[in-house]
Structures are given as C-alpha cells and as structure tokens.
Image (cartoon, helix red, strand yellow):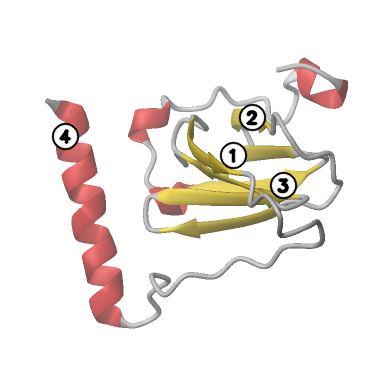
Amino acid sequence: MSGGFLDDNAFSDQRPRRTDSYEINDLLFLGFNSRVLALDRDTGALIWSWKAPKGRSGYVAVMVDEEQLFVSIDGYTYCLDPFSGNQLWFNGLKGFGYGIPTLATAGNHTNSAGAAEMRAREQRRRNNNAQ
C-alpha cells in the first residue's frame, strides 16, 4: 500500500483473518480517492487495498454482486475479486465521457431464494478453497 494514512495500517488493533476465511457478508467495501478498501466489518481491520490505475476522482462507485466487486471511477470500470482485491477485468468505456457513475445489476437478490442461492455459492467457494 502506498500513500497517506493507509501506510500505517492502524485501522484496528486486531490482526485480520486470512482472506480465504471470509464470507462476502464479513466484508465492508469503501471507495474514495481512486481507491477501494475491504475491511473486516466486525473489527475494522484492513483486509486489502486497491488503487485504480486510471481515474483520479474522489468519488468511487462500488457495488458487490454475488462474488464480484464492480468499481467505476471517472468512466473507467473495473471488476475486482472481493476477497483479494485482484483486478479481474477493465473497461475504459472509450467514447462515453466522464461523470459520476451509477452501478446496477439484475443479480442483486432481495428474496429468500436469491439469498439461498448466494449461500450455496459461498459454500461451493469455501469447499473449492479447502481442496
């Protein structure tokens, strides 16, 4: 990590768990100053930090949809792995201009069937990590 207050990593006096021990609901995502952070939502411990290679806005749109974290900064759109912060893909949306982004997907489930599906996917992810 580089720059500003993130260097001291003093968000919490508790040591964070390994990232493979987290479930998506254990994490809190924040976006600002071209950065995205993942915190342990119970302790506030910093799990990972990512800085956008393009885009310099103070406003960062962040949205979690199942097991993908979507980020948009100044018209540049990224997909991150929510558990590691690794960049999965990038789309510069060339020709669409700049502005404050809004993110939405049809995959944000609010019904119990969707919640059950998310729990099943989470269990499969944990089982795959255990192998």
Residue type of the residue flagged with mark 4:
Asn
Q: Label 4 neighbourhood size at 10 Å, few (<14), some (14-19), many (20+)?
A: few
Element under label 3?
A: strand
Residue type of the residue flagged with mark 2:
Ser
Q: Earlier in the sequence, mark 3 or mark 2?
A: 3
Q: Are marks 1 and 2 in contact (CB under 8 Å)?
A: yes
Q: Position of residue 7 (x, y in %)?
A: 78, 17
Could you tell me which residue is drawn at 84 percent across and 20 percent down? 3
Distance from Cα at disc 3 to Cα at disc 4? 29 Å
Residue 18 tag number: none
Residue type of the residue flagged with mark 1:
Ala
Q: Residue furthest bottom?
A: 111
Could you tell me which residue is drawn at 71 percent across and 55 percent down? 95
Residue type of the residue flagged with mark 3:
Gly
Residue 38 tag number: 1
Q: Are marks 4 and 1 in contact (CB under 8 Å)?
A: no
Q: Looking at the rendering, in which quadrant would you find the N terminus?
A: top right
Task: Name the residue carrying label 2.
Answer: 49
Task: Name the residue carrying label 3.
Answer: 31
Q: Label 3 neighbourhood size at 10 Å, few (<14), some (14-19), many (20+)?
A: many
Q: Is residue 51 above or below residue 75?
A: above
Q: Are marks 3 and 4 in contact (CB under 8 Å)?
A: no
Residue 128 tag number: 4
